[in-house]
Image (tube, grey):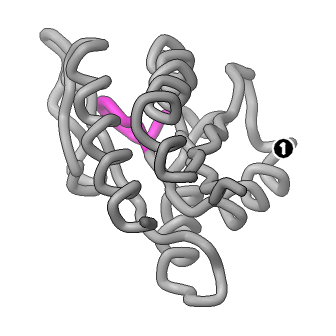
Amino acid sequence: MYQMHRVFCATPWEMEAERILFYDLIGKFNETEAMSKRVLFVPVTLPSLNDKRPLQYTVDDNIRQCRYYILLLSEDWGPVERNFSNDYRLALACAADPALPMQDVAVLFKRLPAGPPPAASLPEPAATFSSAAEFSECLNRLLSGWLESVI
């Protein structure tokens, strides 16, 4: 029997490529690293839709059920229709609640070429990336650390 650990990855509209890559990277990591240790990471994301607010109850419920939460950001929290600031605070509250499975919350920041500096209100990132290869490295480091913590 495998230990299954859900990983929620919150992505703004402009990071749809990273959301899709997240699924691929989790699958490869499971195949090459986690499965041999009887662990599976289960990816959870919000598909690209214009307004997540009508689904907020479901989003919150999914966050509460996850062991890990990753927030991808670039220059700000995003528009009100797809803003993850409350979701991030919920994930932090879940991580602080020993009755819930949440164990870690990580922010990955995408550096945009010639983009504005990040808003001062954004949380400190665990890592930064600017390309798909760098995103892969950041995610694999997170997954490796999480794998070591559960075995």
Residue at 45 percent across and 47 percent down: it is 70
Q: Is residue 117 visible?
A: yes
Question: Left or right: 8 with respect to 116?
Answer: right
Q: Is residue 15 visible?
A: no
Q: Is residue 105 above or below residue 111?
A: below
Residue at 73 percent across and 59 percent down: it is 60
Q: Report x, y in % for residue 108.
A: 30, 40
Q: Is residue 112 above or below residue 150?
A: above
Q: Nearer the viewer, residue 76 or 136?
A: 136
Does the magenta-highlighted stretch encompass residue 110? Answer: no
Question: Left or right: 138 with respect to 12?
Answer: left
Q: Quadrant of residue 151?
A: bottom left
Give the dominant element type of the magenta stretch: helix, strand or loop.
loop
Question: Left or right: 126 with respect to 88?
Answer: left
Residue at 45 percent across and 66 percent down: it is 150
Q: Residue furthest bottom?
A: 98
* Residue picked out by circle 1: 55
Residue at 62 percent across and 38 percent down: it is 43
Q: Secondary structure at mark 1?
A: helix
- Dot 1 crowding, Cα within 10 Å, few <14, some 14–19, many 20+: few
Q: Report x, y in % for residue 62.
A: 74, 55
Give, as a single range, the part of the protein colored magenta.
71-78
Q: Report x, y in % for residue 91.
A: 54, 65
Q: As shown in the figure, which amino acid type bears the numbered disc 1? A: Leu
Q: Nearer the viewer, residue 119 or 141?
A: 141
In which quadrant is the N terminus drawn?
A: bottom right
Q: How many marks?
A: 1
